Amino acid sequence: MQVWLEAGREGQVFTYANPEGWPLASGDLVRLRLQGRRHVGLVVEPLAELPPELAGRRILPIEAVHQSAAVDPHWQALLAQVARDCHTSLFRTLKTALPPGWLGQRAERHASAPRRRIRVEARSDAAVPADATAGLTPRQLQALELLERAGGAAWLSPFSAATGIGRSVLEALERRGLVRLRRMADGLEEGAVLLPGSEGVAPQLERPQVLTPQQDEVLAAIRAAAPGQALLLWGVTGAGKTEVYLQAAADALAAGRSALLLTPEIGLIPQLLERCRRRFGSGVLEYHSGCSEGQRIRTWRRCLASGSPVLVVGTRSAVFLPIPQLGLIVLDEEHDSSYKQDSPMPCYHARDVARQRALRSGARLVLGSATPCLETWLSCQGSQPSTTLLRLPQRIGSRPLPPVRLVDMRHELEEGHRRLISRPLMERLAALPACGEQAVVLVPRRGYSSFLSCRSCGEVVQCPHCDVALTVHRSRAAGGGGAGRQWLRCHWCDHRQEIGERCGACGSTAFKPFGAGTQRVMEQLEAELEGLRVLRFDRDTTRGREGHRRLLDQFAAGEADVLVGTQMLAKGMDLPDVTLAAVLAADGLLHRPDLRAGEQSLQLLLQLAGRAGRGDRPGEVLVQTYCPEHPVIRHLVDGRYEAFLEEELALRRSAGLVPFSRACLLRLAGPSASGTATAAAALAERIRPGVVAAGWLVIGPAPAPVARVAGRSRWQLLLHGPTASVLPLASEAELRAGLPQGVSLAIDPDPLEL
Ligand code: ADP
Ligand code: ZN
Ligand code: ZN
């Protein structure tokens, strides 16, 4: 028996004996020991005989079957494809695809066999044809009679034990429509609760909305799409996309197929889950990092064991669930970068995996967004687009999108006002409590204090060699204490320069690193606006499983007038009293040293704008910036996201940037800064000949944007090459083999952040 083990090195295969004669097959998970410790391994290949070189050696036995048929051949083929696309091993991919803890030593805690309680029911309803009992075998007739005597229904295993009637006899009767076998899970009847609109619907379930003509058209297009087809549902926030998802899911279930609804953030799960459960009952499954380990394993197993369709709501990793008969995959907020896994490997994007799955299982894939990403939009173009574009341009009830007002922070400064919060914003906030309205205030976290901008003219210091803003670095002063030295550095080419005294463009000395934290904003608001109730919404205040929910509930209940927060604030919130959405330092988003900075900040700003004016009162968006001419700000004011995409696409095309070329990032991390830098340089030299021969470029090495994390120094190498070309790299294991001890390597073949 050949078995893969988590404890082994990458892809290492071990041989174990099977003295108990378990009927093992490739794809089973088994329990065993390695060096005295318990593990779970995957059976790669059951061998009939021991390989000759192992004859006479003592072979340890497999101790038990952990889960049979865990990885079926179709699923294994999908994982193998993901492994290839992500330039990593099948084993690593498997680890990502299985519930956490399921392959490790902790697995045993959860390893009790799944309880499959099956209920047998005689059917006496009108659906049974009158002559249905004709031609039954004596055994089948006996089974019917016994079931009648048992009161017409019974649990399968006690019934079989008492009568000797096996499952196959009952299944034959089921095929003739005379009995029903129903799988009961945790006391719930999965089949019926997930089939709205058909018999057995619980009356307490919510009815579907009557669709608007636009929604109707979109749903019809989804229905008419070929199996495996991807569709982009482009609709502003509040356009009724979620309602379309729910009805498309109902379609799939009614056709006997499963549906998977993905959302990027765990903070958005409760809302979506609640809507699904109201519509489909409590049998809706969930799978995300907010679930306990046991809960994730239960969901995973239910998918595996379920012959009947399931409906699963989850985040990124749920895209790997072994869901049977997948008929629909929805990726809501498809542009969201949380769908991308940066570490550990495989560095997959859930959107790409979903495309693969849809093709392989003949499911429709619906990508939903108010602000689709450039790649998806590009895939809708051309004469034979791979994605079908569907639009929902209007909000339900024709509520207008709120207008955007800019506050030019340079004027504020000219007039001697140096506060984080401008006077116009202060005025608006001060007036809130009196009219019973609420506001959300976004304080961008990314880019906090990281680039240098001129407060007088808006100039941002750029790298002379690359089209990105330089980043401020600080070193601790020698001997501790003091502010230390500051300098500017480019993350693409490692160019460095001093921080000047004056702005190179206008000569002003108001030339400082940029930034503001939620904490400081809150303090200023509370100090200056007495009686204004402020809540803070960021990673520090939303810890824990229910953290998001608790804060949002408080805010929704009117316990505060203002919610000050980071990026998370922009997503999904639907509160009728919010009439103002404000951004404190839009510049903190715009000048991040990243290829996608423009696209992502416009997505975020438009999403934030979508929070205001969802109720009866009109909303407004207020944006503070030092740079009102920036294209992102211009397009935000016009509300013309599509025009922005077109400009951006033209720009990337002419510069030959992604997606008109391919990029691959190699990330190294090690305990010492110099050791990691040396290893990165050596790796660059090692791969350069092959990479260059294939027409690719090696850029760097350079320190990673966050150069030190958890005590480890991080460096990176960027490879750049033509689209549709194969990555000119040796296998992951070979690349790793040449690295000094303690230095780790991750390969990200399509990095989001460059
Ligand atoms: P989105 O997902 O695009 O933000 P939703 O599906 O959440 O939009 O719809 C926004 C609001 O409009 C929700 O409160 C929803 O219940 C309601 N809604 C959606 N479709 C309809 C409809 N056809 N008729 C009435 N109300 C609807
Ligand atoms: Zn200046
Ligand atoms: Zn540079």
Image (cartoon, rainbow, N blue to C red):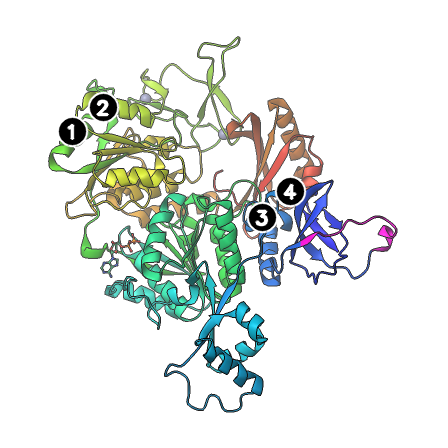
Question: How far is disc 3 from disc 2 in space, using C-alphas?
Answer: 48 Å
Residue at 50%, 82% (x, y): give it.
144
Q: First in sequence: mark 4 or mark 1?
A: 1
The answer to whether the beta carbon of the residue marked 4 is less than 8 Å from any atom of ligand 3 is no
Amino acid identity at mark 2: Glu
Q: Secondary structure at mark 3?
A: loop
Residue at 72%, 58% (x, y): give it.
45
Which residue position is annotated with label 4? Answer: 691
Question: How far is disc 4 from disc 2 in space, using C-alphas?
Answer: 57 Å
Residue at 27%, 31% (x, y): give it.
535
Q: Which residues are magenta?
A: 51-64
Question: How far is disc 4 from disc 3 in space, using C-alphas?
Answer: 38 Å
Give the quadrant of residue 392: bottom left
Which residue position is annotated with label 2? Answer: 526
Which residue position is annotated with label 3? Answer: 102
Query: How many residues crowd mark 3 within 10 Å: few (<14), some (14–19), many (20+)?
Result: many
Viewer-proximal residue among 351 and 282? 282
Measured as percent of width and height from the top left, residue 68 is found at 63, 59
Q: Is residue 110 left or right of residue 46?
A: left
Q: Is residue 359 left or right of residue 269?
A: right
Amino acid identity at mark 1: Ala
